Image: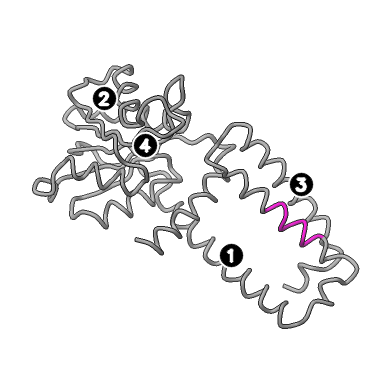
Amino acid sequence: MKSLFEPKIRIVWAMLSALCLLYSAMVFLVHSGTFSFSIWVAGAAFFAACYFFAGKNRWSRVPALLRYIVYAVLGVSLSVFIICEAAILSHFFDKGEENLDYIVVLGAQMRDYGPSVIYRYRLQKAAEYLEENPGTICITTGTQGSNESISEGQGGKDYLISLGVDESRIIAETDSTTTGQNIENAFAIIGEDNISGLKIGIVTNGFHVFRGVHIARKLTDADVCGIAAYMQPQYIPNNMVRECFGIIRDFVFR
């Protein structure tokens, strides 16, 4: 790793820092995720620090023990990041199975004009699946946040109805605030006595499918699969990095 802090590589650190700043501005302007732009600001600061220490032999003047600690932290962090990203990619394009008993659409933010872009893609994928599989029941999930005029579950149901899905095939869950609660409450609606042996699909954007399916499989003996909805390519890096933190949080607290 010593070569990473040599003067000849400073231009790389400068470019990465600038790219992170530009990307953070783009994420901030479209409100993609709560404060997720700050991840990229932190990345810009990190690469700026690398740029600083790569100049004038500054890194070589840092005490050896501290340098080794930094190398160890960076190595562990990179390893964890790679493992999380590999896990995300393992379900990135899940298509689900035909004739599922239920599909659960994980909630996302509602805007004044309707579902946010990311939620709309989930609901559109659900509508597509329901059209192709007329025996499947859909559960939309999510409570009403302080900045939302309607609950995510009810807003999702209303949007599916506007797409032509029969209202009798949609159940709105309106109390959950997290991905885990989305799934737990949806399973409670299905009923613990009835869920064993059922086939259930978790509908969410590709970057989110691994976590949704992983949580669901820990909560039930039912046959669970993922159904990946579309993602805007320019925001995939932001969502992939954010999701890494979600996986780590689930690993620690679940």
Discs 1/2, front? 1
**Element under label 1?**
helix
Residue 60 is situated, as x and y percent measured from the top left of the image, at 83, 76
Marking on residue 107: 4
Say whether disc 1 or disc 4 marks the residue closer to the N-terminus.
1
Q: Earlier in the sequence, mark 1 or mark 2?
A: 1
Quick check: is 142 in the magenta stretch?
A: no
| Residue name at image x 44 percent, y 33 percent | 146
The residues tagged by marks 4 and 2 sit, at their Cα atoms, a distance apart of: 20 Å
- Residue type at mark 4: give it: Gly
**Looking at the image, which is closer to me, 210 or 59?**
59
Q: Which tag is nearer the camera, tag 1 or tag 4?
A: 4
Residue beneath label 1, please? 78
Q: Secondary structure at mark 3?
A: helix
Tell me if 207 is positioned left or right of 141 in this view.
right
- Pointer 2: what residue? 131
